Image (spheres, rainbow, N blue to C red):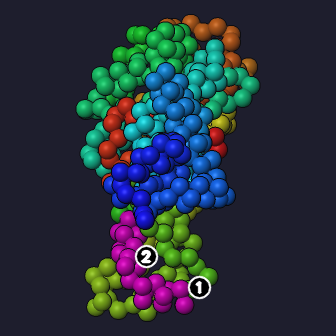
């Protein structure tokens, strides 16, 4: 006769409660999750002798050991190696840790790693923070006793919040210092006070509440009025600091000035962009007739130099484009086509494109060269001066506003003039200028400017990583967790 439910506890006790359990209907193997409804001593003895049970028992034992180790590590504020390595791998691959809550993925990992997979909150509370602290320790070790430069900029996330990023790097005379993102702060409003506060909090994080005021030698930002005001207020606490506004931003404003003085070219670029926007038949016709010419670029006015690049494209391919638009497109199909046909018929359009191609063709390339990380101060200033010489030598009256804009944005950049004087000292030449009297540099501090940056492009690049991390389906991160994620993601090894 089959065993009754009253006899099941006797069998469990006989074979061990760590091996079997029971309910009202069956005895259950804990390792295999296999039920035995009519369990007999012979059935259970035969089952525990099988190889499948032995393998399942070994997996269960390892999982129990890992779970106990994980719980002990959490209680003692220690870190277990497997969850730490798992968390590090997820962050490096930009896989959200909440993906581990997927039961299929979790069962797969537990089956083939024979490890207990911790839940999302455990990883975020303990292991993300531990990786963040390790990364901060690496940054501090890399900076060491070197003087530093700092760059700050802010952006707006998809929820409309202002987010400030802080980049730091060591100033060395023998090699460029690697830029590190040091801080990511959500700020209530963007003004000089919040920028100065984030700046000071960041150097406190670097030196662990021991701010070394004499080590901060360079502050790079954009030329927004609140950034200028923040630089002036921070100068009180960091008297040796030079505030430089980004020269790549400055050249972008020069490009904007060029766009203003060539309105017909701007209208032509915009109208042709509309012609091919969401028009696959026109794109196909263009490619079949002008297969050797790429499609017209679609400039974004906030993206540095793209409008000038588009104007250069139209100057290079003017005749084929004109022929295609005027001869093979019907103005009745689109208002943009009619406008483009009219503009291509103006003689002044050709003249304007010739002027841009001959006088401003080096502007996008100069911006690209300045954006490169690790350039020396000499190289960066040389790129800027080379472009300036092409503007100064031109005698075309129409470009005078561009020349005046270039000179004006550089004249307002007082910190850049100081760096030029330091470059002259490093080169052993005399520029006829003098350094500000409030700067008291040692010889070592002067030589540390060999690889000083004059652009804030590194902090701009970090915003792309921020947008990958903080997206519409991943918006539950707290400000503290967001800071840790961004610091880890932006500073990982390439």
Magenta residue check for 63: no
- Asked whether residue 323 is in view, the answer is no
Taking the spot 54% from the left edge, 18% from the top edge, the residue there is 217
- Asked whether residue 204 is in view, the answer is yes
Taking the spot 53% from the left edge, 69% from the top edge, the residue there is 313
Report the span colored magenta.
264-288
Residue 349, by quadrant, is bottom left
Q: Is residue 452 left or right of residue 255?
A: right
Task: Tell me if label 2 and label 1 are in contact, CB under 8 Å.
Answer: no
Q: Is residue 55 left or right of residue 126?
A: right
Q: Which residue is mark 1?
A: 291
Image position, residue 273 (x, y; %): 39, 73
Image position, residue 94 (x, y; %): 51, 50
Q: Is residue 459 left or right of residue 388?
A: left
Q: Residues within 10 Å of mark 2 (few under 14, many from 20)?
A: few
Image position, residue 30 (x, y; %): 49, 50
Q: Secondary structure at mark 2?
A: helix
Residue 229: numbered disc? none
Q: Which residue is mark 2?
A: 347
User: Eyeballing the image, is 459 above or below 356?
Assistant: above
Taking the spot 65% from the left edge, 59% from the top edge, the residue there is 50
Q: Nearer the viewer, mark 2 or mark 1?
A: 1
User: Eyeballing the image, is 26 above or below 416?
Assistant: below
Identify the main secondary structure in magenta: helix
Q: Nearer the viewer, residue 469 or 191?
A: 469
Q: Nearer the viewer, residue 184 or 319?
A: 184
Q: Residues within 10 Å of mark 1 (few under 14, many from 20)?
A: few
Q: Nearer the viewer, residue 326 or 106?
A: 106
Q: CA distance from mark 2 to mark 1?
A: 27 Å
Magenta residue check for 276: yes
């Amino acid at each position: 006769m089959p065993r009754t439910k009253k006899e099941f506890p006797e069998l469990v006790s006989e074979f061990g409660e760590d091996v079997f359990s029971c309910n009202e209907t069956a005895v259950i193997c804990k390792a295999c999750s296999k039920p035995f409804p009519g369990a007999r001593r012979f059935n259970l003895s035969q089952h525990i002798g099988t190889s499948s049970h032995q393998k399942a028992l070994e997996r269960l034992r390892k999982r129990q050991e890992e779970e106990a180790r994980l719980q002990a590590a959490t209680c003692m504020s220690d870190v277990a190696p497997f969850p730490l390595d798992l968390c590090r791998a997820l962050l490096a691959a930009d896989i959200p840790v909440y993906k581990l809550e997927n039961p299929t993925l979790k069962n797969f990992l537990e089956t083939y790693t024979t490890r207990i997979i911790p839940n999302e909150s455990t990883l975020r509370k303990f292991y993300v923070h531990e990786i963040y602290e390790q990364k901060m320790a690496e940054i501090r070790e890399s900076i060491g006793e070197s003087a530093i430069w700092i760059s700050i900029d802010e952006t707006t996330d998809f929820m409309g919040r202002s987010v400030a990023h802080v980049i730091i790097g060591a100033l060395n005379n023998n090699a460029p210092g690697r830029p590190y993102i040091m801080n990511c702060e959500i700020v209530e409003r963007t003004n000089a006070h919040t920028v100065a506060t984030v700046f000071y909090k960041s150097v406190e994080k670097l030196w662990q509440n021991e701010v070394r005021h004499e080590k901060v030698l360079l502050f790079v930002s954009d030329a927004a009025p609140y950034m200028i005001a923040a630089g002036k207020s921070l100068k009180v606490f960091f008297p040796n600091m030079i505030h430089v506004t980004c020269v790549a931003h400055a050249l972008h404003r020069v490009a904007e000035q060029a766009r203003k003085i060539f309105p017909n070219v701007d209208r032509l670029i915009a109208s042709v962009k509309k012609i091919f926007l969401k028009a696959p038949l026109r794109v196909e016709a263009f490619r079949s007739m002008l297969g050797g010419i790429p499609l017209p670029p679609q400039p974004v006015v906030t993206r540095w130099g793209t409008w000038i690049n588009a104007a250069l494209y139209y100057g290079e391919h003017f005749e084929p484009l004109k022929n295609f638009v005027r001869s093979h497109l019907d103005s009745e199909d689109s208002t943009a086509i009619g406008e483009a046909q009219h503009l291509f018929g103006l003689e002044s359009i050709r003249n304007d494109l010739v002027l841009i191609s001959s006088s401003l063709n080096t502007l996008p390339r100069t911006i690209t060269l300045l954006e490169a990380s690790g350039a020396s101060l000499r190289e960066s200033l040389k790129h800027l001066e080379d472009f300036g010489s092409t503007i100064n030598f031109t005698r075309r009256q129409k470009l005078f506003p561009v020349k005046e804009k270039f000179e004006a944005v550089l004249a307002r950049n007082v910190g850049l003039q100081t760096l030029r004087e330091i470059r002259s000292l490093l080169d052993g030449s005399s520029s006829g200028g003098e350094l500000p009297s409030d700067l008291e540099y040692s010889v070592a501090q002067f030589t540390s400017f060999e690889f000083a940056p004059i652009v804030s492009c590194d902090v701009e690049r970090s915003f792309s990583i921020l947008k990958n991390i903080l997206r519409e389906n991943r918006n539950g991160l707290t400000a503290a967790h967001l800071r840790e994620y961004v610091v880890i993601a932006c500073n990982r090894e390439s």
